[in-house]
Image (cartoon, grey):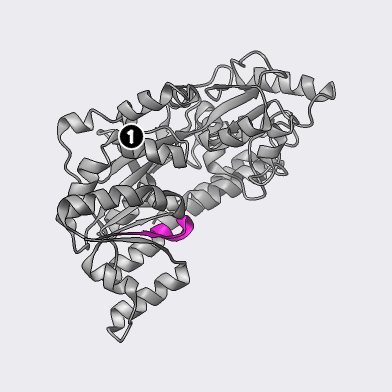
């Protein structure tokens, strides 16, 4: 048995691989030979090195060749579906749980069978996120959600509401202590992920739920009275309101605003913590607050997942790897050390939490969160909703703007 080192290939290289696989010509390529003979795992480049020793251990134990290949994260979902359709995909793919609906719709992944005691070893929200049409379609390993991080030198007290946060941030700005009331990325095309806690607190929803608690694509919330009311409250925070939300604050500058001490409040996720610590900002973590008199602010909860490919050549071994190795605390801890997001495995979270108490605060802030919808119809939401958000923050009429966004989304869903 031997382990192949990670081979990084771009989308163009992947397409070349697919073309040669379909054409059956003289490839002479090591990667294609590996894809035919070895158990192959696809992950992004950040996780590939972490997986190599575990893949080697698994290969030694089962007498199988294992290859871990890196694919750019922004191409991973589409490349996997394309490769599956061409009959040349991997055995396992590692990615976000909200890809599930797309993968199931394309017949690209198999359900997972986990013993009940193994299921109970994971956070319930993580298991809920990877459950689709009443079946488990992946094994989760990490979770993430938005939190509010505040500079405790500038803002010692946790705000109980959006209004309290805006009032305190406005006071700091007017006193010349900061430049911006708060840091929440919007940009010129909006950001539905980051505005979601405010949207839900103001009564908005994206999709309703059916009797089983699953997202119902026939119950679109964008364009309803609830969404109009929510956008009217968001507009009050916009450029013609308090100025707490601005299109000039985007994913490129929002972190530096906080890390340079130019705002006291930062709505972000655990991925920002390493840079905040490096910057030396004294901070505290809490849940994103809701509007006064509104509902609880509910952030999206995203879950990183191991999927078993439906078209893989080593399906039994792939099932063995994801059901037994991904449930090991050692793998969850190694993945955390590479990318500090809270493990989905409770034992790993408790182990890491002894040295990183921030993780428990992040998890607590996401306890009332909504799993990011994994239904394929979610793809129709992002662009129209984000553009409507940016327009309303810029001063557009909420009712007219959100109604038009809802019509666009409904047309796309069909």
- Look at the image and tell me whether residue 398 can be seen: yes
Q: How many marks?
A: 1
x, y percentage for residue 162? 62, 22
Q: Nearer the viewer, residue 205 or 118?
A: 118
Left or right position of 275 against 72: right
Q: Which residue lies under the disc numbered 1? A: 126
x, y percentage for residue 127? 29, 35
Q: Quadrant of residue 206?
A: top left
- Look at the image and tell me whether residue 136 can be seen: no
- Give yes or no for residue 412 being in the magenta stretch: no
Left or right position of 177 against 159: right
Quarter of the figure that contains the C terminus = bottom left
Name the residue rendered at 22%, 54% in the picture.
Answer: 59
Eyeballing the image, is 369 above or below 134? Answer: above
- Helix, strand or loop under label 1: helix
Eyeballing the image, is 412 above or below 221? Answer: below
Residue range in magenta is: 67-77
Left or right position of 124 against 295: left
Neighbor class of circle 1 (other Cα within 10 Å; few <14, some 14-19, many 20+) is many
Q: Residue furthest bottom?
A: 25
Left or right position of 54 against 285: left
x, y percentage for residue 359? 46, 26
Quarter of the figure that contains the N terminus = bottom left
Q: Nearer the viewer, residue 46 or 191?
A: 46
- Give yes or no for residue 69 being in the magenta stretch: yes
x, y percentage for residue 353? 42, 23
Q: Quadrant of residue 152?
A: top right
């Amino acid at each position: 048995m031997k382990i192949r080192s990670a081979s990084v290939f771009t989308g163009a290289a992947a397409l070349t691989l697919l073309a040669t696989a379909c054409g059956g010509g003289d490839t002479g390529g090591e990667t294609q030979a590996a894809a035919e003979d070895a158990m192959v795992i696809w992950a992004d480049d950040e996780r590939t090195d972490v997986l190599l020793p575990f893949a080697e251990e698994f290969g030694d134990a089962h007498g199988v060749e294992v290859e871990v290949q890196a694919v750019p994260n922004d191409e991973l979902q589409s490349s996997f579906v394309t490769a599956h359709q061409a009959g040349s995909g991997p055995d396992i793919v590692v990615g976000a749980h909200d890809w599930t609906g797309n993968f199931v719709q394309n017949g690209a992944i198999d359900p997972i069978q986990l013993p009940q005691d193994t299921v109970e070893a994971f956070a319930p929200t993580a298991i809920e996120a990877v459950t689709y049409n009443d079946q488990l379609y992946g094994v989760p390993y990490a979770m993430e959600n938005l939190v509010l991080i505040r500079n405790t030198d500038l803002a010692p007290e946790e705000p109980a509401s959006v209004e309290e946060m805006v009032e305190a941030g406005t006071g700091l700005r007017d006193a010349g202590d900061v430049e911006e009331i708060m840091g929440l990325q919007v940009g010129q095309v909006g950001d539905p992920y980051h505005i979601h806690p405010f949207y839900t607190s103001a009564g908005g929803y994206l999709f309703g739920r059916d009797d089983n608690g699953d997202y119902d694509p026939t119950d679109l919330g964008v364009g309803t009275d609830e969404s109009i009311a929510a956008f009217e409250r968001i507009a009050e925070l916009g450029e013609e309101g308090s100025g707490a939300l601005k299109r000039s604050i985007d994913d490129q500058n929002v972190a530096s605003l906080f890390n340079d001490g130019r705002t006291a409040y930062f709505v972000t996720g655990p991925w920002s913590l390493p840079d905040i610590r490096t910057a030396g900002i004294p901070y505290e973590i809490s849940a994103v607050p809701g509007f006064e008199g509104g509902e609880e602010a509910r952030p999206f909860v995203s879950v990183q997942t191991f999927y078993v490919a439906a078209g893989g050549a080593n399906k039994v071994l792939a099932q063995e790897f994801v059901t037994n190795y991904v449930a090991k605390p050692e793998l969850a801890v190694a993945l955390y050390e590479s990318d500090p997001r809270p493990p989905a495995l409770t034992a790993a979270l408790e182990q890491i939490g002894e040295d990183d108490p921030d993780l428990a605060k992040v998890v607590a802030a996401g306890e009332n969160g909504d799993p990011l919808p994994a239904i394929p119809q979610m793809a129709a939401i992002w662009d129209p909703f984000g553009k409507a958000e940016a327009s309303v923050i810029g001063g557009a009429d909420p009712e007219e703007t959100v109604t038009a966004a809802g019509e666009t989304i409904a047309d796309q869903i069909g």
